[in-house]
């Protein structure tokens, strides 16, 4: 069937860490079942956390011991792929019949990645995408993904892919993923700004696809009982803004602001052919005689062992 219900689950990583946050995700099982959602997208860095305002003790040219301690705590709160958290999410997916796409902090050796995982009702953890370019000081704590984790998943709602937060503003990444034939674009984020809504509408309109953006929602520093440098004590750290957009850039649901919740909309992938009638940026609207994009999808490990 071309029609299905999709959803953005707007919640935030909880102060108690990944176990408490996982329980929060699982608590939405009844709401997912009631909604009939076949795909649920959740925010960036949901399991593992987005430590907004944390400096990790780094100044240009040197790092403080307390920053190393902060990083060690952050590392301990990250998850392994696969691991007990993905097992629990796979069970949730199987019970609800919903595909799950969500952001996690992935441990790989001693490096952390901002990763999106894809969980299917029958296959469990089927793929992952590592954020290619951490933004600003995110580069202190996250490694960069390579071209080997750019999956497109054949799900029950269509062909699904993901770009994380400001990756959505990388034109060449968008072009590469459009060329893979994406129907539903998942955009986990922590960007709460109004301009983010414009970005999501542009991606939907440019790619002529459905976009689901799920943003974290976090209380104010005052409510959390902490101080965050250069951030108003009473202003929410992350105010949400999740939304669902149609292939002509029309907002189907949201933005949801300032609260947790499951945001739903019905989509019809049969609409995509009609939407691409006058704009197919990797087809009839491309100019391959002038422009060509080459995408290297090989894994790029730092060390390779070659044996006879």
Image: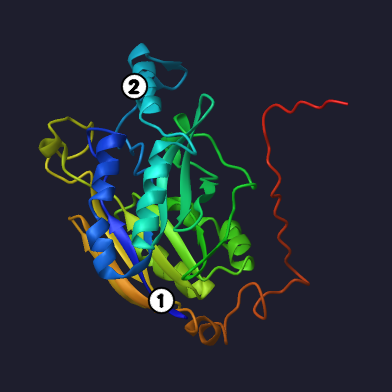
Does residue 95 lie above or below 131 as drawn?
below
Q: Secondary structure at mark 2?
A: helix
Residue, x 31% and y 70% (percent of image)? Answer: 36
Q: Secondary structure at mark 1?
A: loop
How many residues crowd mark 2 within 10 Å: few (<14), some (14–19), many (20+)? Answer: some
How many marks can you see? 2
Residue 244, quarter of picture? bottom left
Does residue 129 lie above or below 16 as drawn?
below
Residue 121 coordinates in the image, percent (x, y): 44, 58
**Location of the C terminus (image quadrant):** top right
How many residues crowd mark 1 within 10 Å: few (<14), some (14–19), many (20+)? Answer: many
Instruction: Point out the residue furthest to the top here.
Output: 65
Does residue 258 lie above or below 55 as drawn?
below
Tag 2 near tag 1, CB within 8 Å: no
Report the disc number at residue 70.
Answer: 2
Between disc 2 and disc 1, whose residue precedes? 2
Residue 8, quarter of picture? bottom left
Q: Compare residues 126 and 152 and report the one nearer the observer.
A: 126
Circle 1 sits on which residue?
246
Q: Compare residues 229 and 121 and report the one nearer the observer.
A: 121
Residue 71 coordinates in the image, percent (x, y): 38, 23
């Amino acid at each position: 069937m071309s029609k299905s219900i999709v959803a953005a689950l707007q919640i935030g990583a909880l102060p108690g860490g990944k176990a408490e946050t996982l329980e929060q995700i699982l608590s939405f099982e009844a709401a997912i079942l009631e909604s009939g959602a076949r795909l649920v997208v959740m925010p960036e860095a949901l399991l593992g956390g987005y430590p907004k305002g944390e400096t990790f003790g780094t100044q240009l040219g040197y790092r403080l011991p307390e920053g190393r301690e902060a990083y060690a705590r952050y590392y301990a709160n990250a998850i392994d792929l696969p691991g007990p958290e993905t097992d629990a999410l796979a069970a949730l997916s199987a019970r609800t019949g919903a595909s799950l796409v969500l952001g996690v902090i992935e441990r790989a050796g001693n490096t952390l990645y901002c990763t999106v995982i894809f969980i299917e009702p029958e296959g469990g953890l089927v793929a992952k995408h590592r954020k290619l370019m951490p933004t600003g000081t995110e580069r202190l704590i996250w490694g960069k993904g390579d071209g080997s984790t750019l999956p497109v998943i054949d799900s029950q709602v269509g062909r699904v892919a993901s770009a994380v937060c400001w990756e959505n503003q990388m034109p060449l990444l968008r072009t590469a993923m459009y060329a893979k034939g994406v129907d539903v674009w998942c955009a986990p984020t922590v960007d709460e700004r109004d301009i983010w809504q414009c970005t999501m509408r542009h991606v939907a309109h440019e790619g002529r696809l459905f976009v689901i953006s799920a943003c974290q929602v976090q209380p104010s520093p005052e409510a959390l009982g902490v101080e965050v440098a250069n951030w108003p004590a009473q202003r929410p750290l992350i105010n949400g803004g999740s939304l669902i957009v149609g292939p002509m850039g029309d907002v189907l649901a949201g933005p949801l602001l300032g609260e947790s919740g499951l945001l739903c909309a019905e989509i019809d992938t049969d609409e995509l052919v009609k939407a691409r009638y006058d704009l197919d940026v990797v087809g009839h609207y491309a100019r391959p005689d002038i422009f060509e994009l080459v995408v290297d999808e090989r894994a790029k490990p730092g060390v390779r062992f070659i044996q006879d």
